[in-house]
Image: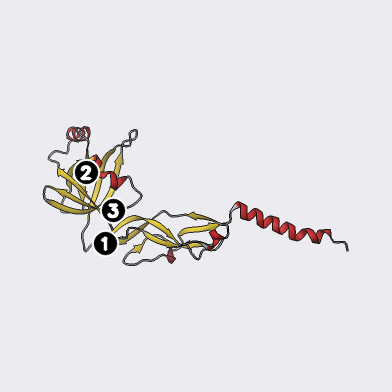
């Protein structure tokens, strides 16, 4: 999985006044969990642009005065009016410990059902995976090539190379529905097929 580097500085004071001062200066208060003890730090709000405002997922390299931590974003709080980032929680990664996180679904292939006039519906845009940090995927690939009209792609058909998908086996990832145009054409064809029979005299 790709990573983003966040450079920050540890916080000496974590009180409300210090937090307010940090935010007024364009800094985001953060906490890193998962180590021997929580690490409180701040970083510029613009440093999180490529981490927060993107459909992609990343691991994070946090640099604090010569110390480096590998982590993932665990929780984020936004201002209810301005949508400004108020606070971020990170969780430290360890090479020998599995981690759970959501990754996007990437659709590949040309569905037979879609080419026949069906409409593709993506039921799951993200999936929870569990893996060692080194095996975390950037995305989970969903091949829709063999989906006929009316078919569904279940999670059991997706690859699980080096990671485990945590959703139930009956989870539908995508499906091809009959479009209104195709349904109307089928109905008209059925009516046309019945018309001659009605017109025949016994």
How many circles with numbers are drawn on the protein? 3
> Percent position (x, y) of residue 84?
30, 37
Q: Is residue 56 left or right of residue 92?
A: right
Percent position of residue 202, x then y: 88, 64
Mark 1: give few (<14), some (14-19) or many (20+) Cα within 10 Å. some
Q: Is residue 183 left or right of residue 37?
A: right
Which of the labelled discs sits on residue 58, or is there none?
3
Q: Position of residue 173 (x, y in %)?
A: 45, 58
Assess disc 3: are there few (<14), some (14-19) or many (≥20) residues with their C-alpha within 10 Å of its C-alpha.
many
Q: Residue at x 24, y 40 (%)?
A: 45
Quadrant position of the N terminus in the picture = bottom left
Q: Are marks 2 and 3 in contact (CB under 8 Å)?
A: no
Q: Quadrant of residue 168?
A: bottom left
Front in this rendered view, residue 179 or 160: 179
- Dot in front, 2 or 3: 3
Task: Give the class, few, some or many, for how many residues have Cα within 10 Å of label 2's Cα (few <14, many ≥20).
Answer: many
19 on left or right of 110: left
Q: Residue at x 22, y 57 (%)?
A: 93
Which of the pair 154/45 is nearer the observer? 45
Q: Which residue is mark 1?
A: 98
Upstream in sequence: badge 2 or badge 3: 2
The Cα atoms of the two marked residues, 1 and 3, are separated by: 16 Å
User: Given the current orientation, which residue lies at the most extreme right position?
Assistant: 202
Q: Which residue is mark 2?
A: 30
Which type of secondary structure does the marked residue at label 1 adopt? loop
Q: Earlier in the sequence, mark 1 or mark 2?
A: 2
């Amino acid at each position: 999985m790709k990573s983003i580097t966040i450079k920050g500085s540890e916080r000496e004071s974590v009180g409300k006044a210090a937090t307010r001062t940090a935010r007024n200066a364009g800094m985001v208060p953060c906490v890193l969990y998962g180590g021997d003890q929580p690490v409180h730090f701040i970083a510029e709000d613009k440093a999180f642009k490529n981490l927060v405002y993107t459909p992609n997922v990343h691991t994070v390299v946090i640099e604090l005065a010569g110390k480096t931590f590998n982590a993932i974003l665990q929780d984020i709080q936004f201002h209810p009016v301005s949508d400004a980032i108020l606070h971020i929680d990170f969780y430290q990664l360890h090479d020998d410990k599995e981690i759970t996180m959501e990754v996007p679904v990437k659709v590949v292939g040309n569905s037979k059902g879609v080419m026949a006039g069906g409409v593709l519906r993506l039921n799951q845009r993200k999936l929870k995976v569990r893996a060692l940090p080194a095996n975390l995927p950037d995305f989970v690939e969903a091949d829709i090539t063999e989906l006929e009209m009316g078919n569904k792609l279940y999670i059991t058909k997706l690859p699980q190379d080096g990671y485990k998908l945590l959703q139930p086996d009956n989870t539908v990832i995508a499906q091809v529905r009959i479009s209104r145009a195709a349904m109307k054409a089928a109905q008209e064809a059925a009516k046309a097929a019945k018309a001659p029979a009605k017109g025949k005299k016994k």
